[in-house]
Image: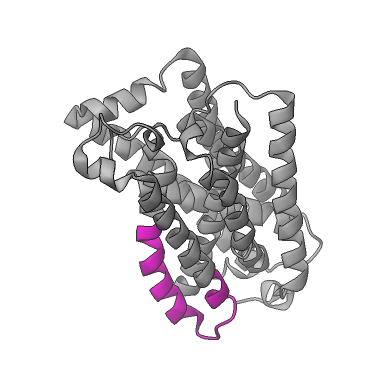
Amino acid sequence: MSTMEVFYIVFVGLTGLAMGSLVVLMLGHLMSEHWLAPVRSEIEAAALTLPLLLLLSIPLAFGLEQVFPWASWRDDLPPFRAAFLSPAFYLLRSAIYLGVCIALAFWLTRTPHVRRASAIGLACLIPVMSLSAYDWVLSREPHWWSSLFGFAFGLSEALAALSIAILVALLKTEPASPVRLKSLERALLTLALLSVWTWFAQFLIVWLANLPQGAEWYARRSDPQSLALVAVSYGLMLAAILVLVPSGVSRIGMIVGSALALLHHGIHFVWILQPQGAPSWIDLGVMAALMGLWGGALTIVMQLRPTYAEEAAAEP
């Protein structure tokens, strides 16, 4: 695995978590639900790490050909798709995606009119996440386009973002209202079920329509190792759902369910990306260092942001 591949995996994973945090934050504000308060500080902090991820994308801009085959050869693509995936246009779009998300993160964490900002922001974020999922993930194998892939990938990232926020929030000592925790539990379970259904729906569409390019995409992920990955991934998700289904799950149950959902996301993420080559110890070290840098930035931002502890502890 090349160093650029490591940067790519970390960038896509962490940027997806930050964008997923924006989705969770906007949905929480729009629905005026009780589950947002206990994790609002963590969700806002994750979204506000986007400027750091913009810096992380700079090395990738100079090494596109090491990650995306079309960056150096596009003659086998249809003319429109070849033009769409031209490196200059691709980098411009990527900068717009990140710029829009950064602007939304700062707007949402500063405006007193959070519901109005969330409604506008979600309308902007949905196309941004769908297009960025194609550009950053699906275009690694550019012959297949799926309009559902971006939605499914965004749901997975929102689920992972909420899972991390719950783990961080519940491992702290601040109390939270049982009613709010119950709503948080239902929100996590809903995202988990919706994510599973959306990925299955995409597979079903490809299978029923007998789309050659889509079938080829799945066939490349059907070797024994990849099938073992996806089996473990969905086994973890089934376990998480079984833990979360009983209403009024305990604090420990919430932590276990969130951890299982997060493990599912990580393994499923690897299955989707299909990294090129096995990682060396140096690659793993670089990956750990980059993730540690992001974790340090997240911790600093959380310390600078309001905790919303009183709102989380109060009965709605």
| Residue 180 seen in this snapshot | yes
Residue drawn at x 39%, y 75% is: 120
Please state which of residues 49 and 119 is positioned toward the viewer in this rendering.
49
| Residue 251 seen in this snapshot | no
Residue 45 vertical placement versus 231 (above, below) = below
Task: Please report the bounds of the magenta region as a residue range.
Answer: 105-128
Residue 127, given in percent of the width and then of the height, sits at 35, 59
Quarter of the image for residue 18 reads: bottom right
Please state which of residues 103 and 177 is positioned toward the viewer in this rendering.
103
Q: Quadrant of the C terminus?
A: bottom right
Residue 304 vertical placement versus 42 (above, below) = below
Residue 25, given in percent of the width and then of the height, sits at 53, 67
Residue drawn at x 62%, y 56% is: 55
- The reply, left or right, for residue 155 in relation to residue 108 is left
Residue 224, given in percent of the width and then of the height, sits at 47, 13
Residue 87, given in percent of the width and then of the height, sits at 39, 46
Residue 306 vertical placement versus 83 (above, below) = below
Quarter of the image for residue 299 reads: bottom right
Residue drawn at x 65%, y 42% is: 259
